[in-house]
Amino acid sequence: QASPELSRRLAEVSGEDTLEMLGYAEQLQRSTVYLRPSARRAVRFAVEVAYLSHKNQTRRSGEPFVTHPVAVAAILAETRMDRDTVVSGLLHDTVEDT
């Protein structure tokens, strides 16, 4: 269950942001086919949280910061880690960076 603040922020996401989030989610969905559907939904939700947490943040290279946690989660998924580990990869920078 999402917090009221997160639910509000998700409801206010623009169409462009939605497409960008979907792109990141699709990258991970291909890597997480081994997970149960409920676990894959949790990963998708974590992508949305990571995206919103890092919105407007960029890396030194200029690319969106969220590409880093998505890449970490993809590595974890490629090694067939469980749901919580993949989600942790997505969210590992949200506390210190937001």
Image: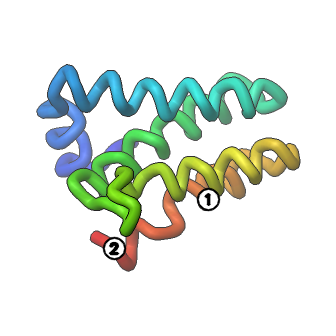
Measuring from the top left, give residue 75's x and y in whole percent.
74, 51
Q: Is residue 94 above or below residue 22?
A: below
Nearest the camera: 36 or 12?
12
Q: Is residue 89 left or right of residue 80?
A: left
Three-letter residue code for mark 2? Asp
Q: Which badge, 2 or 1, comes first in the chain's sequence?
A: 1
**Which residue was labeled with disc 2?**
97
Who's the residue at 82% across and 43% down the image?
78
Q: Hey, which residue is sitting farthest bottom in the picture?
A: 96
In the picture, the quarter occupied by the C terminus is bottom left
Who's the residue at 56% across and 30% down the image?
41
Who's the residue at 71% across and 57% down the image?
85
**Which residue was labeled with disc 1?**
89
**SS at mark 2?**
helix
Measuring from the top left, give residue 52's x and y in whole percent.
29, 48
**SS at mark 1?**
helix
The label number, if any, that marks residue 69 in the structure image: none
Q: Is residue 33 above or below residue 28?
A: above
Q: Is residue 42 above or below residue 84?
A: above
* Residue at mark 2 to residue at mark 1: CA–CA distance: 14 Å
Q: Is residue 53 left or right of residue 66?
A: left
Three-letter residue code for mark 1? Gly
Within 10 Å of disc 1 (Cα), the crowding (few <14, some 14-19, many 20+) is many
In the picture, the quarter occupied by the N terminus is top left
Q: Is residue 6 left or right of residue 89?
A: left
Within 10 Å of disc 2 (Cα), the crowding (few <14, some 14-19, many 20+) is few
Who's the residue at 46% across and 69% down the image?
93
